[in-house]
Image: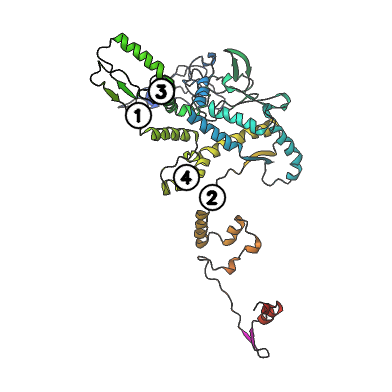
Amino acid sequence: MASNGVMTPLVADQQWTKPVPLNNFQQQGYTGLFGPGTPILPVRPEENPRIFQYQPGINLVTIPRSGFNLIPFPMLRNLATVCWQIRLNIELIKREMRALDWAIVPAKEKDPNANNYNVEIDEVTKFLGNLSGYKSFDGFLNAMLEEILVTDALTLWPETGMTDVSLIDGTTIRPLLDFRGRTPLHPTPAYIQYLYGYPTSFFTSDRLFYMPYNSAVNNPYGSTPVELIILIVNLALRRDTYRVGYFTEGNVPEALIGAPSSWTPEQAKTYQEYWDALVSGNIAQQRKMHFIPLENGRGQIPVYEFKKSDDSTAVFDEWLFKIACWACGNSPSEFGLVDGSGLGGSGYAGQMQNVQYRSMFGPMTQFTAKIFNTILQDWLGKKHLSFEWQGIEPENDALAQAQVDSIYITAGVYGPEYVQDREAIPPEFRTSDAALNWPGLGPIETTVEPVVVNTNTEQATSPEVDVSKFFQGRQWDNYG
């Protein structure tokens, strides 16, 4: 700082080790007529900003996910299991991901040594097929997706000597924070595993692979589809509980029947217990009406009917399921939920493949491919190889593509040969540009050869071919 009290810029090797007073606030531009006012400056300013405002002593908390106002891991697993709307969406993603083909390919598109990688590719493919003791790549992928979608605490541990990669239960791992709120770098411990509430071991960031799918800046944990719609999940569970109780618990209130006025409360209670014992848990008895004695044989006991059906039940259930689909990135049409018909129904469903690719398939395949490339390139040291999902791009609309090609050819952006190469049209079926009068490319100039009359045969022929000999040589006359 200069002697006049004005702060000077920091140089690369300058550090703030003591308070820096500001003697002249007028020159700093804080005060003056209708000015913003002098700020409360830190007495001990920090050199770098903190990532977020964490709770002091947050590393002392022993329960993973605690201290960040997040849903506990056990609750996430329970909700993803009992809420069938969420579970069906999770299983759909897992099945569709497991149905994809994958391959180990050269990392560079045009690698001159690609033919020499066949042995390494076979070894890596075999290695990925035995990860974490699952004996198949499909089983490992299924377990990995379960962790990503339910807890978002994917944790991998490369075994010593890279003999295997173990899938760790991420709910037992608690990430630590450094002073700035980041994950500490090696050699400072970055993760602690808690078992039975007791810390059993700690790991550095270069040994334990902990990577949330939906990360945030204000906590080291990820967020799952269950958390996005926790109120909807709660509502769906309560609705299912109500339905279960309809068939298993209590006297289903099909109607209220007035008891005789001469009955005492004890008599009414006794008959109620008899009634509940008769119909509780017995669906066949619940759907029947039972006769009860009239009062002194005179008059009729009043019966109060209730509404037996809810017209909005199907609509409400469909709405709940659509919310779950959107939270997981799935299309409701995958479950047969299509609104109406025409452009808003079947036409809408026809475009859902592209929508699902952008919302679920694209991000999920990129995330998982990054994980396998970390195993392949960083841990196994195969920098020249790459993991690749195959057949994940959505199919283009043929009619829309044909219309685009027609417009581009008309405008002269590209010619028919570009389309023929893209569609891999065989050479025998191709037509050259010169033989087609494509609009927008200008008129095609052609030269018409004059017809030469042969006075000897009196047959008209062109200079290039004798038409009569062409047909006679192939005995076309035999066909009449």
In the image, residue 310 sits, relative to residue 472, either above or below, namely above
Disc 4 versus disc 2: distance between alpha carbons?
14 Å
Q: Quadrant of residue 41?
A: top left
Of the numbered discs in the image, which one, if any, rests on residue 291? none
Residue reaching furthest front? 297
| Element under disc 4 | helix
In the image, residue 291 sits, relative to residue 142, either above or below, namely above
Q: Residue at x 56, y 73 (%)?
A: 445
Q: Position of residue 462 (x, y in %)?
A: 64, 81
* Region of the chain picked out in magenta, as a range: 451-462
Crowd band around label 1 with a 10 angstrom C-alpha radius: few (<14), some (14–19), many (20+): few
Between marks 3 and 1 in the image, the one whose residue lies nearer the viewer: 3
Q: Amino acid at mark 1?
A: Lys
Q: Amino acid at mark 4?
A: Ala
**Residue beneath disc 4:** 349
User: How many labels were placed on the picture?
Assistant: 4
